[in-house]
Amino acid sequence: MFRPAMNEQVRTQIESAIKKHKVVLFMKGNKHFPQCGFSAQVVQILKECGTEFDSVNVLSDPQIRDGIKEFSEWPTIPQLYVGGEFVGGCDIIKDLYAQGELQKLLGVQVENVTPVVSLSAAAAKAFKEAQDGGDDVLRIEVTPQYKYDLHVGPKKAGDIEVKSEGVSIWVDKGSAKRANGMQIDFVETPEGGAFKIENPNEPPGVKPLRPEELSKWNAEGIKFTVFDVRTDAEMKQASVSFAKALDDAGMKTLAALGKDEKIVFMCHHGMRSRAAAERFLAEGYKNLYNLEGGIDAWSQRVDTKVPRY
């Protein structure tokens, strides 16, 4: 696609932004409200580094969006500049951060952490079975958004070796602090085996809960409260005996619960309940669960007497 050459006014704007701030990110959206996943990842990394930076929203001016690509001779957004020099896009920033090089470039002291990662016996067995005896290793990466990547693959420069249950685990250097204290289990689900991760560093979020787990909680007498966010008409068609409607009375009950108590939200298929849980997460509740698959999954996998609709 042909693009006209960048005019001098646009070049001056770009140069001014780069010179004005030691660290500037040309991105979609701004550092408070990123408008694409790649921009959001770089913003999160810069915030994790604790460095001050400015952002330029390329969506607000098509000439800047096209001009910065020509200026840097780099085809994608976001683009990071430090000290007037172009550093790279999202993938390069992630790699530099993982290796500790970005922190050095930013003048941020790198905290060396040797993480402790604990495997259950079941997880250790599953990992041992996944390794085929070649040169590949078991690696763990934890993104700044606390997305987990557990895989068998080549070891990377800077990886930190930790051991648990006789298994060597190589932790991405940039993930070390986030991975410290992580516990990994392996559980059987209707869809097959799955790794279950508990991480004390992860900020509160809405946690998925399988119907079988909720049924087990109920049988074991674990303290929790379930709120059903469906309409009255839907609840008349099908309901779970120990769930409370999130009506006016339900809202009062919820308001009286402690912020750390286990609270489960449910609906028909799990979408409305997740939205409700996210709302209350923003209000300070820290131990929220969404019943995955909703009452439809409950009726199929726990109590077939509950009608489906």
Image (cartoon, rainbow, N blue to C red):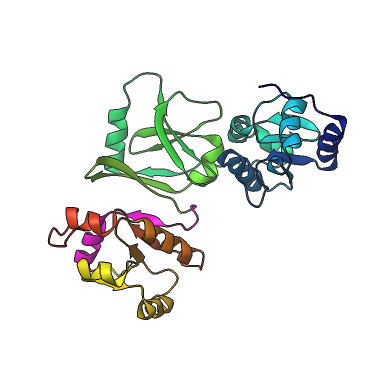
303 sits left or right of 62 in the view: left
Q: Nearer the viewer, residue 203 or 171?
A: 203
Q: Identify the image quadrant of residue 73.
A: top right
| 84 in relation to 274, above or below | above
Residue 13 spot, x, y in % from top left: 84, 38
Q: Report x, y in % for residue 57.
A: 71, 43
Q: Is residue 72 magenta?
A: no
- Front one among 5 and 21: 5
Query: Quarter-wise, where is residue 113 in the image?
Result: top right
Q: Nearer the viewer, residue 129 or 290?
A: 290
Q: Is residue 212 visible?
A: no
> Against 258, is 189 above or below?
above
Residue found 70% across the figure and 21% down from its top: 2
Residue 160 in the image: state x and y as whole percent.
50, 33
Query: Magenta span has 217?
Result: yes
Residue 294 visible in the current orientation? yes
Residue numbers of the magenta segment: 201-221
Q: Which residue occupies the foreground of this view, 74 or 91? A: 74
Which residue is pictured at 33% across the width and 20% down the height? 133
Report which quarter residue 177 is drawn in. Answer: top right
